[in-house]
Image (cartoon, rainbow, N blue to C red):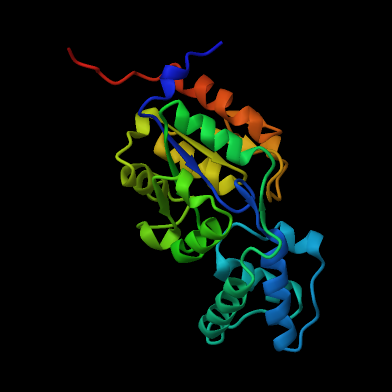
Amino acid sequence: MHDPHVLIGATIAFDLDGTLVDTAPDLVGALNAVLAEEGLPALPFAEVRLMVGRGAKALLERGFAAAGAPLSAEAAPALVQRFIAVYLGRIAHESTPFPGAVEALERLRADGAKLVVCTNKLTDLSLALLDALDLTRHFDAVVGADRAPAAKPDPRHLLAAIAAVGGDPARAVLVGDSINDVLAGQAAGVPNVVVSFGYSETAPAELGGDILVDAFSEVPDACLALLAPCPQPATGL
């Protein structure tokens, strides 16, 4: 049994797509809408689901390539903006928090942790999604790729997210679903909790995270386990 006081002042960073929220239905819908506008066939949900999580441009590039029309450098900027506009219009039509996510966030906050979203999604889109799902109130900051020096897997993204809430990387955990999350955590010296229900193309157990969980209800205890060996902050007298 871990001491919940370990979480006081610790930082728990969360990926968004495929970790906190099942966003694939709306992202796939927006991608297929843009493909249709360009006269291209729709892609199967199961195929596109695993393309999610690396940002809008990467999703569009992979989607157009899969549809048989690789995206040119000249066309990309306008199509990315079109995709963002379409996606924003349906950002939470079908997207929902993964089961147990809200309860886990509430428990972590009640135990004194600082919570931050660290996502390759643009910050404005992330906030729009979190607002629509009434999740923003659980977080002390939201740091999209545009609010960091570089996107995950670059460790500077994670370090910027931790800094945004006044946290210490030595007392932080990153919860994610992809190799980008694992690589960012490893490079930043921050342990990883990997969720098994996200959008990874690699088997989650093979990503190299520190703890693998199959349900959000396991996340708080996993964070406690990873933070227990960390130096505790001085309390003073």
The residue lying toward the viewer, choosing from 119 and 215, is: 215
Q: Is residue 233 above or below residue 108?
A: above
Is residue 220 visible to us here? yes
Q: Quadrant of the C terminus?
A: top left
Left of 62 or right of it: where is 159?
left
| Residue drawn 76% across the image and 76% down it | 67
What percent of the width, then of the height, locates residue 95? Answer: 67, 58
Q: How many marks?
A: 0
Left of 137 or right of it: where is 47?
right
| Residue drawn 19% across the image and 15% down it | 236
Left of 175 or right of it: where is 41?
right
Residue at the limit of the structure toward the left, as seen here? 237
| Residue drawn 57% across the image and 82% down it | 82
What percent of the width, then of the height, locates residue 116? Answer: 43, 44
Q: Is residue 171 above or below residue 160?
A: above
- State the image quarter where residue 218 is shown: top right
What percent of the width, then of the height, locates residue 3? Answer: 47, 13
The residue lying toward the viewer, choosing from 157 and 102, is: 102
Q: Is residue 197 above or below residue 87?
A: above
Q: Quadrant of the N terminus?
A: top right
Q: Is residue 159 above or below residue 61?
A: above
| Residue drawn 53% across the image and 80% down it | 81
- State the image quarter where residue 148 is shown: bottom left
What percent of the width, then of the height, locates residue 73? Answer: 54, 82
Left of 167 or right of it: where is 109?
right
